[in-house]
Each structure stands twice: as structure tokens, then as C-alpha cells.
């Protein structure tokens, strides 16, 4: 059963833990206002494990440079914990990420199913 995450008024989500990975489903805005709380909350869960992370941003309305910076930091944190981080995306998020050429580094995925299959092979 997914647990509710308390982030900000503009960013909401749930966390679901599977055998060797975690799924975070987020809605709203990943911007300068929500970035710090988002990074701290997800970072805490990376530390707790499991270290393989899927961020489902398919329902995110907006990502700014602060949000992109948080995503980069979380990828590095997951890698330092011997894990991975994948981002399930939508056209708005994809466009923003591609503008700064981070699509490979952030491991953009078209669907949650693809992201889960990538982890199940690890």
C-alpha cells in the first residue's frame, strides 16, 4: 500500500516499497519552492533503502532549474548508495530535461513498466 508523502502544498506524492526498489509517484510542481523538501525527503529514503529508485513524474506539471538540480543530486546519491535512479516522464518534463541535455544522466523512461523491468534485471 503506498504511503502518503508530506512535501509541499504544490508537490504531493506517495511512496511504495518493493523488494529491491522504491517508487515515488509525484504530482504538482517541482520548482524552487519545493526543491529543498523534495531533495531531503527522497534523499532520506535513499539512505533507508532500497537504493534503486523510480521517480514517477508523469503527473508533474512543471520542473524548473532548481528541480533539475535536485534530480541530479538524487541520481548521484543513489549511485553512491550502490543504487540507481530512473525518471518516468511526460512531454513537459522531457522537454525541460532535453533542453539541458540530461536525458541520459537522469535515465528518462516512457513508463513505469519499463523502469520496473530495468530494475528487475539488477
Image: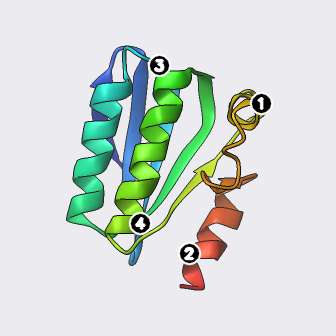
Binning the other alpha carbons within 10 Å of mark 1 as few (below 14), some (14 to 19) or many (20 upward) gives some
Q: Residue at x 70, y 28 (%)?
A: 96
Q: Is residue 114 left or right of residue 9?
A: right
Find numbered disc 1 in the image and state the secondary structure of the residue it sits on: helix
Does 4 appear above or below 118? above
Residue nearest the viewer, comparing 87 with 23: 87
Q: Which residue is mark 3?
A: 31
Spatial separation of the CA atoms under disc 2 and disc 1: 25 Å
Asked whether the residues under the numbered discs 3 and 4 touch, taking CB atoms below 8 Å apart as contact, a structural biologist would say no
Q: Residue at x 30, y 58 (%)?
A: 46
Q: Which residue is mark 2?
A: 119
Q: Which residue is mark 4?
A: 79
User: Comparing marks 2 and 3, which lies closer to the viewer?
Assistant: 3
Spatial separation of the CA atoms under disc 3 and disc 4: 23 Å
N-terminal of the pair, mark 2 or mark 3, is 3
Spatial separation of the CA atoms under disc 3 and disc 1: 15 Å
Residue found farthest to the front:
100
Binning the other alpha carbons within 10 Å of mark 4 as few (below 14), some (14 to 19) or many (20 upward) gives some
N-terminal of the pair, mark 2 or mark 1, is 1
Residue 40 visible in rendering: yes
Asked whether the residues under the numbered discs 2 and 1 touch, taking CB atoms below 8 Å apart as contact, a structural biologist would say no
Q: Residue at x 69, y 33 (%)?
A: 100
User: Comparing marks 2 and 1, which lies closer to the viewer?
Assistant: 1
Q: Which residue is mark 1?
A: 95
Amino acid at each position: 500500500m503506498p504511503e502518503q508523502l508530506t512535501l509541499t502544498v504544490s508537490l504531493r506524492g506517495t511512496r511504495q516499497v518493493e523488494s529491491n526498489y522504491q517508487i515515488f509517484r509525484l504530482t504538482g510542481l517541482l520548482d524552487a519552492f519545493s526543491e529543498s523538501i523534495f531533495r531531503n525527503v527522497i534523499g532520506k529514503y535513499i539512505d533507508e533503502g532500497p537504493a534503486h529508485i523510480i521517480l514517477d513524474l508523469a503527473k508533474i506539471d512543471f520542473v524548473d532549474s532548481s528541480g533539475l538540480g535536485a534530480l541530479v543530486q538524487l541520481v548521484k546519491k543513489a549511485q553512491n548508495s550502490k543504487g540507481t535512479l530512473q525518471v518516468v516522464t511526460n512531454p513537459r518534463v522531457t522537454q525541460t530535461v532535453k533542453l539541458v541535455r540530461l536525458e541520459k544522466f537522469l535515465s528518462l523512461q516512457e513508463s513505469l513498466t519499463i523502469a520496473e523491468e530495468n530494475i528487475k534485471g539488477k
